[in-house]
Image (cartoon, rainbow, N blue to C red):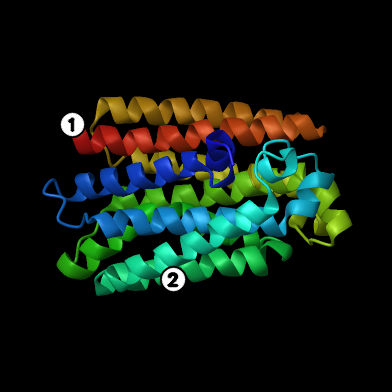
């Protein structure tokens, strides 16, 4: 079991996204960072690891048919039996940390765990439902500290609420692009994703509409800010999203959809950069 294959299997880059989102959201709300605890950060990361692991085990046949060379189970970097062993280890660690955590951390992460497992076992086979659940897990690292401060101190922030809504819209859009990319393998495996049900072109139209609403949302969100650097980053996101929307409208090959899906990752991390700027300046 090689380290590179292991990092790819659990999507370690997503763990970085989760940690940074939790930290910078907390710093943006509270410079004293009273929400932060080791368990509170490690648990959602391990749950993400477990969700991606179960997903790859269940999707192994479909990923082979879709030639997903980015999946270490498909390339042979990680064996299936090794993946199962890692799954059991993660389950034990998650249960242990839940036992040692406080009430809020337990409740939020149990919900996060249940949503992730429901997606892996059932929801991803239902058109649009799986995409929505993945988008919710993308919002979760920001919602996690936000709800804590809202419950404890009745905290509200218009920019953060729009920011989370924008992430949700973007998350659905990115997952729909991935569904288009995987449509042939999903058809063969009987997975009823939206492109399988309504076709690639209709799914493209819906994705383009969602991305346009996303653009409107982040532009409105920018009106809450007086930080020039953060507004400049939002301007970059707007321009780059328009570019990807044009590419998506013209795309008709699997490799193009895969490239768009990968480039959308840049927007995810640029979005975290906005929180970093706002929390550190």
Q: Which residue is mark 2?
A: 111
Q: Which residue is mark 1?
A: 281
Q: Is residue 194 above or below residue 6?
A: below
Q: Is residue 166 above or below residue 215?
A: below
Q: Position of residue 176 (x, y in %)?
A: 67, 48
Residue at image x 16%, y 50%?
A: 33
Q: Residues within 10 Å of mark 1 (few under 14, many from 20)?
A: few
| Drawn side of residue 281 relative to residue 206, left or right | left
Q: Position of residue 99 (x, y in %)?
A: 31, 73
Q: Nearer the viewer, residue 27 or 244?
A: 27
Residue at image x 26%, y 74%?
A: 103
Q: Nearer the viewer, residue 61 or 248?
A: 61
| Drawn side of residue 46 relative to residue 54, left or right | left
SS under mark 1 = loop
Q: Is residue 112 above or below residue 260?
A: below
Q: Residues within 10 Å of mark 2 (few under 14, many from 20)?
A: few
- Asked where in the image residue 107 lies, by quadrant, the reply is bottom left
Residue 200 appearing in the image? no
| Viewport quadrant of the C terminus | top left
How much space separates mark 2 and mark 1, taking CA atoms? 33 Å
Residue at the right extreme of this rendering: 188
């Amino acid at each position: 079991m090689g380290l590179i294959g292991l990092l790819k299997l659990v999507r370690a880059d997503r763990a970085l996204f989760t940690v940074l989102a939790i930290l910078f959201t907390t710093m943006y709300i509270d410079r004293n960072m009273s929400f932060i605890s080791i368990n509170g950060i490690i648990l959602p990361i391990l749950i993400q690891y477990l969700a991606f692991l179960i997903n790859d085990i269940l999707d192994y046949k479909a990923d082979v048919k879709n030639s997903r060379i980015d999946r270490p189970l498909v390339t042979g970097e990680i064996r299936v039996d090794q993946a199962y062993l890692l799954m059991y280890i993660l389950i034990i660690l998650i249960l242990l940390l839940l036992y040692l955590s406080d009430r809020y951390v337990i409740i939020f992460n149990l919900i996060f765990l249940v949503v992730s497992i429901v997606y892996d076992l059932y929801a991803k086979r239902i058109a649009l439902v799986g995409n929505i659940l993945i988008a919710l897990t993308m919002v979760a690292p920001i919602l996690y500290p936000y709800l804590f401060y809202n419950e404890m101190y009745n905290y509200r922030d218009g920019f953060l609420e729009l920011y989370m809504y924008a992430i949700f819209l973007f998350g659905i859009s990115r997952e729909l692009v991935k569904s288009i990319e995987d449509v042939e393998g999903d058809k063969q495996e009987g997975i009823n994703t939206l492109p399988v049900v309504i076709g690639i072109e209709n799914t493209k139209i819906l994705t383009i509409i969602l991305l346009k609403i996303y653009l409107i949302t982040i532009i409105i969100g920018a009106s809450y800010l007086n930080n020039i650097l953060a507004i400049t980053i939002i301007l970059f996101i707007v321009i780059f999203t328009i570019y990807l929307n044009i590419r998506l409208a013209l795309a008709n090959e699997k490799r193009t959809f895969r490239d768009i899906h990968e480039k959308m990752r840049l927007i995810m991390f640029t979005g975290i950069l906005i929180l970093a700027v706002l929390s550190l300046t």
